[in-house]
Image: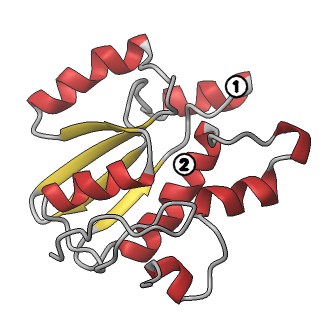
Amino acid sequence: MPRSIFNQVGFRGSLEERFEAKYIPKNQQTSTPSEAALHASVAEFLNWMLLPPAVWTTFPAGWGKLGKATAGYLKKSGLKAGLPDCLVFHNDTCIGIELKTEKGKLSAAQKAMFPLLEAAGIKIFVCRSMIEVDDVLRNCLVPMRSHQWQDRRGLKSTPLAVT
């Protein structure tokens, strides 16, 4: 049975499982990853999967409560509320990806900001898993390594198109 690209390079378990095992106390681990675990998994995925000339970045200003000094500095420096978690740049395209858990909802600032970004030509997507991120990037023709997904039991999913 074919293995996923992550298992072929020596990773053990899914990215979410490895992050959860490393960074979240055992008594707080759940079967669905937290938003922080999803962010870390997507970051590792994007670092590995994107091919040049595509680049990506994130600024996790929405993670947790910032101190007054930090929040004030970021606001004074021009950080806007409601920006998506990840920005992917390829050719003349910018793709905004907001990561949410299964039950996560957009904030009021995001509901106000996303239409403004779309009017400026940025494609905005809300993703709840790495597979959804992968689908968005492939549909937007962002160059990526070829691979196929496996579920936690090792069953092969439908192969994804190679760009």
In the image, residue 76 lies at what x, y percent?
A: 50, 28
In the image, residue 103 lies at what x, y percent?
A: 51, 23
Residue underneath mark 1: 65
Query: In the visual, does 134 lie left or right of 59?
Result: left
Q: Is residue 35 above or below residue 119?
A: below
* Residue type for callout 2: His
> At 36% from the left edge and 61% from the top edge, which residue is drawn?
56
> At 34% from the left edge and 48% from the top edge, which residue is drawn?
132
Q: Residue furthest top?
A: 108
- In which image quadrant can residue 14 be found? bottom right
Query: In the visual, does 142 lie left or right of 7?
Result: left
In the image, residue 137 lies at what x, y percent?
A: 24, 58
Foreground disc of the pair 1, 2: 2
**For residue 88, which numbered disc appears in the image?**
none
> At 67% from the left edge and 32% from the top edge, which residue is drawn?
70
Q: Is residue 143 above or below residue 109?
A: below
Residue underneath mark 2: 39
For the image shown, how many numbered marks are present on the structure?
A: 2
Figure quadrant of the C terminus: bottom left
Question: Is the residue marked by circle 2 packed among few (<14), some (14-19), or many (20+) residues within 10 Å?
Answer: many
* Residue type for callout 1: Lys
In the image, residue 54 lies at what x, y percent?
A: 25, 70
Q: Is residue 98 above or below residue 11?
A: above
Question: Is the residue marked by circle 1 packed among few (<14), some (14-19), or many (20+) residues within 10 Å?
Answer: few
- In which image quadrant can residue 130 be found? bottom left
